[in-house]
Structures are given as structure tokens and as C-alpha cells.
Amino acid sequence: MRLLKAIYNNLAAQVREVNRRYAEPRIHMTPLVKICLLGLRFYLFTLVGLMLFKFVTLVK
Amino acid sequence: MNFISKIFYEYRRALKALGLFLSIAGPGIIVMVADNDAGGITTYTTTGAQTGMHLLWFLILLGPVAYFVQEMTVRLGAVTKRGHAEAIFDAFGSFWGWFSLLDLVMTDWLTMITEFIGMTAAMSIFHIPAPVTVAICWTIMGAMIMSGRYWTWEKIALGFCVINMIYVPAAFMVHPSVHDVVYNSFVPHFPPGGLTNNLFFLLMANIGTTIAPWMLFFQQSSVVDKGMQEKDIVFGKIDTAIGALLTVIVAAVLIIVAGTLLNGAQVEDAAAAAIKLMPMNKYIGTFVAIGLFDAGLLGAICISLASSWAFGEVFGWAHSLNHKIHEAPWFYAYYFFDLLLAGTVVLIPGAPLVLITLFVQVIATTLLPTALVFLILLLNDEKTMGKYKNTLFENVANIGITLVIIVLSTMYGVTTLFPNLLK
């Protein structure tokens, strides 16, 4: 149990370090880049939702 | 005399260039041939059995598409000296970075399972039980990285690429109609019955198997691990073009074989195709079975490495095949963890393997646009790419490809909810 906790703590620290290192996007945020990223968010939420729906209905 | 010396000079120059190319070639050929993995072989045989040779033109069209997409990773890797995962984290921040990494891990793991399904099914034709096949695969894949040299790993992988060409003689042995092959290769058309739901799914599966997110991650990391420089980009492009040609050849010959001998037959997967081909011609059946095992092995080797490289880049672990196991323990630990987990799932009785196979291609296709959009944005960042950023022609080609994939993916998403839409 102690070992698992140590592994978890180590992993969480590494994830925090990655989040800190890459907190700010370095690409030049032109309006086109912003539009692309916004479009991607919308696209992914819609399609992943559809795929999950199909998966759940198939499994049922 | 002057003429002879000029010829000799050109001959020596060409020889030197060839030597240089042979030392640089590898990542492009390996990623493209590995692209025809176990899932891919199943997709091609099913396509051939269901539609004959009518979709040969579509496969040929996917060759340049794969080249244009993969070539970008060569430039990005050679210029930034960073793998794809690290490049995304750095350019777009941690939200998109984690999304891409988790997406890669999920699709890679599911794809790895399909590779093991393919390999065990192929070896079962030769009466080798699944646990033995899985153990053999683990041993081969473990042994490949033991040397601690990228060069050794790459040459062994290229050897598996050569074995993948085993399908080519099979296409000649079925004696297909040359007229049919030429017509179906160069005249775009749909099979009799037109665009149905089933045909649409086949087209999507073929796109999914030709361009996959793991390929972007793999080739870029491979280019970096190999130490390719900006001056090597031309050779990297040739390497990728040769790989694209090989992937189309393998796909086309499989469709020719299945389209000629199994046209109209019910074929669930490549192993079932091999079993059905055995009574018709035992050599062709054997070639398909051996090729399926090789395809699964090559795919598993590359996919597990793509994930390991990605984790190494992001977490800052040592992550090179030039490291010994004790020098990069986490990198190799993840590699083996991926292998063991995927192999074990295949051995679980009653695991939903067919469902996994079905979804892996489709999920990869659905998530591909994200990876492509990131790639195009990165390749247009002048600060990062300098003179190697995308040209107008490359942008037109790549944005066109991405838009088509987005439209097809969206259509697929909608047709899953409304299955009668295209009937």
C-alpha cells in the first residue's frame, strides 16, 4: 500500500511538472490558430460523443 | 578525356548519394510498411472480398495522401529535434498535449490488441496455440531492443518489411485480368450498388488503416532518434515516398488476391481469408497467413515504440533505442508494459476482440483530424520551421486532405446514429 502511494505521488509530481513546463502555448496565436483550436474542440466533443453513444448501445 | 572524367565524377557522386540515402533510409519505409498492419491486412482482404477490385483506385489515391502527411513529420523532426508529443505539448500547451498523448495511448493500446489478434489467428492456421504465439512475439520484440542500438533495431525491422512483400507473388499466382486491374486502378468508380452504408464503412476503414495517428508520432520520434539533420530532409522524403509506394503495392496485391479468389465470399478477417484460400491454392493461403503474422508483428513493434517515445519525451525520461535498458528504464518499462498488457488481453477467454477490432480503425479515423490540424499548424509556424515551413502547394494538398478526412469522419459519426441515412 505504501509502495502504491509512493508511485502515485511520484507520478502526480511528474504530471504537475509537465503541466508547469507546458503551461503556456508557445505557438504564435494568430486568429487562424485560435479558430482552428476552437473548431477542433467543437468537432471532438461532437464526434467523441457520437462514438461513445454507438459503443454503449452496441455493448448493451 | 574531359567527358570521361565528368562521367566518372557523376558516377562517384551518385554512388556517394546512394550510400548516404541507404544510411538515412529507414523510418519512412518502416512506418509505411508497418501501416499495413494486421488490421490493415484484414481491411484489404475484406474490401477485396466484398467489392472485388472496384476500390483499387481508392487505395492508390491513399498512397500520395499518406506521403504528404508523413513527409511533414520528417521536416518537423529534423528541424526541431523533438518528437511529435513534445512538439504538441510545447506549441499548444498541456491541455492539447494531454489530449494527444491520451488519445495516442488509447488508440495504440487498442491497435496493439488487434495486432496480437492477427498474429495469434495467423499462427493458429499452422496449429500453433495462442499462448505460444504471444510468447514468441514477446521474445522477438524484447530481443530487438536488447542491443541498445537504434541501427540494429532498424535493420531487423527492415527485414520484417521485406517479409511483408510476400503478398506480391500471390497476386501473380492468381492470374488476374490485366484489363480489370488497370481499369479499376485508374478509373475512379464505386462497385455495383453505389455508395451504401457498408461501402462507406469500408472506405473509412481503408482511410483509417492508411493514415493513423500513431504513424505521425512514430516517424517523427524515429527521425529524431536516428539523429537526422536538416540536410537529410531530402533523403527522408525519398525514404517516405518509397515507403508509400510499398504500402500501396501491398494493399493493391491483397485486394487483387481477395477480389479474384474470394469475390462475394463472406470474409470476417484476414485469417479467415487465409483459411478459405488454402484449399484453392495452399501457397497463396500460406503467404497470406505468414504475411498476416509479419504485419501484426511489425505493427506491434512500431506502435509500442510510438507510445514509449511519446511518454519519454513528455516526462523527460531517457527515451532512445541507443540507450541500454538500465540507461532508459522507464522508456523500456512502458514498452514492455504495453506489450504484456496487449498480449494478455488476447489470451483472456471471451474478451470482445471483434468489437475492439471494429472500433480501433474507426476511433483512429475519428481522432486523426486533430493530429493533422496540429501538424499543419506546426509546419506553418515560421518561428519554428524557418525555411522548412509548408509551401503553398504543400498547404493546399494537406489542408485538402484534412478537410476531406474531417467531412468523412463527421459523416461516419452521423451515420452511426442514423444507420439508414445512406441506404
Image (spheres, coloured by chain):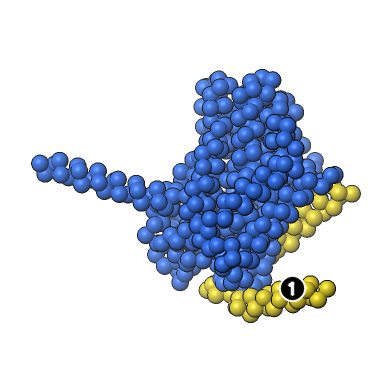
Chain colours: A yellow, B blue
Q: Residue furthest right?
A: A60
Q: Name the residue under label 1.
A: A7
Amino acid type shown at disc 1: Ile
Depth check: B375 or B301 in front? Answer: B301
Image coordinates for residue B255, horizontal then vertical, percent: 61, 31
Tell me the quarter of the image containing the C terminus of chain B.
Answer: top right
Image coordinates for residue B339, horizontal then vertical, percent: 68, 53
Point 82% across, 54% down: residue: A53
Depth check: B195 or B292 in front? Answer: B292
Depth check: B258 or A33 in front? Answer: B258
Position of A7 relative to B282 (above/below): below
Tell me the quarter of the image containing the N terminus of chain B.
Answer: top left
Is residue B104 left or right of B242 when viewed as pictured?
Answer: right
Point 44% across, 65% down: residue: B79
Depth check: A30 or B323 in front? Answer: B323
Image coordinates for residue A51, horizontal then vertical, percent: 77, 53
Point 64% across, 58% down: residue: B335
Asked where in the image residue A10 lies, by quadrant, the reply is: bottom right
Instruction: Tell me the chain of label 1.
Output: A
Count of all numbered marks drawn on residues in the image: 1
Residue A55 visible within the image: yes
SS at mark 1? helix
Position of A24 relative to B318 (above/below): below
Image coordinates for residue B76, horizontal then vertical, percent: 48, 62
Asked where in the image residue B227 lies, by quadrant, the reply is: bottom left
Position of B163 relative to B156 (above/below): above
